């Protein structure tokens, strides 16, 4: 811990606060759901010694308190002793950082569109979006672009859920849907992870609306 730079920690906490505020205003943290993490940027640390700043468990994410964030190691353990509990889903975050080499931020939200799409396409284990301009937000620049996001079952056991997510992770698709639960997204910066999340949510909302429009046409 002596090696860890306080400025880097403060910067990580500030980033989480800004993202938390933005998503909260969109209504993306209903009933204390959702969690966020960023890698604490500390160049002297080796990759496997990295630490992350993550939201504490069970907090109302529409308000700010000094207890909102906590530091954890890549095995999910606390960096410093604390009475605070890190997110119950910390192991999902650490597993994503370990599988995606340049991952700097992981965001998780529960929304009605991501829950409905995850249920609608659960049997296929994935959902594909084709020919949407917003696919460029995933850095996919080609004619007839498409993106396919995997869907996993909502296992009660977090280690099992983390393992299932890591089994379907594809580096070129920065997200995984969990059936009737929510979405995990990541990026090589908090800016990129936010852009990915907004693009996925746009596609889910579009698909959901299109589904109903076609039904009642
Ligand atoms: C209140 S339901 C949501 C939780 O069970 C969980 O899925 C979640 O997203 C938030 O858990 P948390 O421990 O606060 O990070
Ligand atoms: Zn959740």
Image (spheres, rainbow, N blue to C red):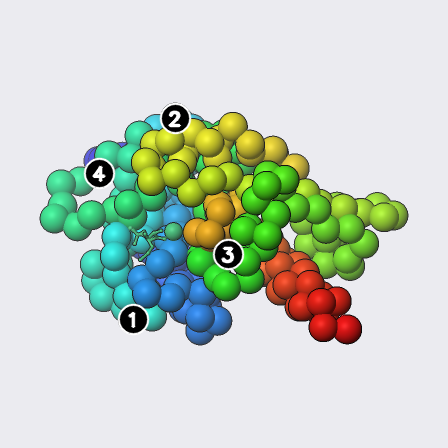
Which residue is nearer to you in this view: 89 or 83? Answer: 89
Residue occupied by mark 3: 115
First in sequence: mark 3 vs mark 4: 4
Between the residue at mark 2 and the residue at mark 3, the CA separation in whole angstroms equals 33 Å
How far apart, in angstroms, are the residues tagged by discs 4 and 2? 15 Å
User: Are the residues tagged 4 and 1 within 8 Å (C-beta)?
Assistant: no
Disc on res. 78? 4
> Which-is-in-front pick, marks 2 and 1?
1
Report the Cα–Cα distance between label 1 and label 3: 24 Å
Q: Secondary structure at mark 4?
A: loop
Q: Which mark is residue 48?
A: 2
Towards the viewer: 99 or 160: 160
In this rendering, the answer to whether 15 lies above or below 65 is above
Which residue extends farthest front? 216
Q: Earlier in the sequence, mark 2 or mark 1?
A: 2
In the image, what residue occupies the spot 72% across and 58% down? 134
Query: Where does the image place residue 176, in percent across and percent down from the top left?
Result: 54, 43
Q: Spatial distance from mark 4 to mark 1, Cα to Cα?
A: 23 Å
Q: Nearer the viewer, mark 3 or mark 4?
A: 3
């Amino acid at each position: 811990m002596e090696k860890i730079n306080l400025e880097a920690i403060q910067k990580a906490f500030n980033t989480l606060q800004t993202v938390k505020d933005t998503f909260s205003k969109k209504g993306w943290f209903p009933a204390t759901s959702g969690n966020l993490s960023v890698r604490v940027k500390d160049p002297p640390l080796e990759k496997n010694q990295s630490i992350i700043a993550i939201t504490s468990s069970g907090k109302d994410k529409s308000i700010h308190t000094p207890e909102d964030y906590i530091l954890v190691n890549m095995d999910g353990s606390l960096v410093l002793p604390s009475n605070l509990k890190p997110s119950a889903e910390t192991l999902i975050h650490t597993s994503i950082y370990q599988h995606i080499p340049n991952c700097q931020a992981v965001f998780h939200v529960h929304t009605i569109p991501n829950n409905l799409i995850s249920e609608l396409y659960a049997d296929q284990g994935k959902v594909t979006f084709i020919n949407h301009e917003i696919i460029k937000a995933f850095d996919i620049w080609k004619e007839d672009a498409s993106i396919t996001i995997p869907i996993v079952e909502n296992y009660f056991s977090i280690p099992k859920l983390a393992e299932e997510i890591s089994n379907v992770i594809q580096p070129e698709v920065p997200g995984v849907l969990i059936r009737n639960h929510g979405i995990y997204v990541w990026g090589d910066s908090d800016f990129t992870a936010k852009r990915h999340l907004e693009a996925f949510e746009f596609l889910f909302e579009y698909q959901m609306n299109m589904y109903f429009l076609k039904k009642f046409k």
